[in-house]
Amino acid sequence: QVQLVESGGGLVQPGGSLRLSCAASGIMFSISNMGWYRQAPGKQRELVASISSDGTTNYADSVKGRFTISRDNAKKTVYVQMNSLKPEETAVYYCNAYGRTDLFASPRAFWGQGTQVTVSS
């Protein structure tokens, strides 16, 4: 059973910073891409940032220059450092991992349960 466990969400003032972490536990043969998505009330889930197994990163235009995604392959963990946060970035942030549970399994996406980030004074 693969689980993605997120941590680091909370309440922060506008202009503040948060660091989210997500660790994959359970049997996971290989993980290619890992990333973060967010979903605000009444809106669709959107990509925030992603990182491949070789470290190639991709960011939503709205977070470029403020967010930094990184990963520790040995720990099967992905992080996102979020700086200069804005109130409109209040959302539930979800961790995502794409990979295989064993050599013969088809790759698929796995999701965390989500962590709330609230940007408010």
Image (cartoon, rainbow, N blue to C red):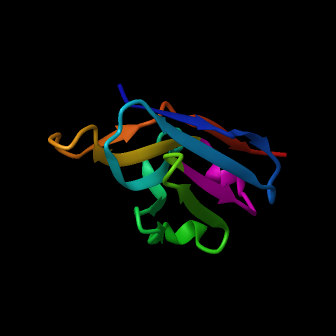
Looking at the picture, how far across and down is residue 104, in whole percent? 14, 41
Q: Residue at x 44, y 56 (%)?
A: 47
Whether residue 104 sits left or right of residue 60 in the image: it is left
Q: Position of residue 92 (x, y in %)?
A: 56, 39
Image vertical order of residue 109 relative to residue 16, above or below:
above
x and y percentages locating residue 115 in the rendered image: 59, 35
Q: Quadrant of residue 70?
A: bottom right
Q: Is residue 80 above or below residue 59?
A: above
Classify residue 110 by image quadrant.
Answer: top left
The residue nearer to you, when weighing 114 against 22, is 22
Q: Is residue 86 magenta?
A: yes
Tell me, yes or no, if residue 44 can be seen here.
Answer: no
- Is residue 113 left or right of 97 when viewed as pictured? right
Q: Position of residue 4 (x, y in %)?
A: 47, 35
The answer to whether residue 40 is seen in the rendering is yes
Tell me which residue sits at (70%, 50%) in the image.
Answer: 19
Q: Nearer the viewer, residue 121 or 96?
A: 96
Q: Seen from this angle, which residue lies furthest bottom?
A: 65
Residue drawn at x 71%, y 57% is: 86
Whether residue 21 sits left or right of residue 53 in the image: it is right
Compare residues 34 and 103 and report the one nearer the observer: 103
Judge from the rendering whether residue 91 lies leftward or rightward of residue 112; answer left or right: right
Quadrant of image for the N terminus:
top left
Q: Which residues are magenta?
A: 78-91
Q: How many numbered marks are there? A: 0
Occupied quadrant, residue 32? bottom left
Depth check: give the residue in front, 54 or 97. 54
Q: Is residue 71 magenta?
A: no
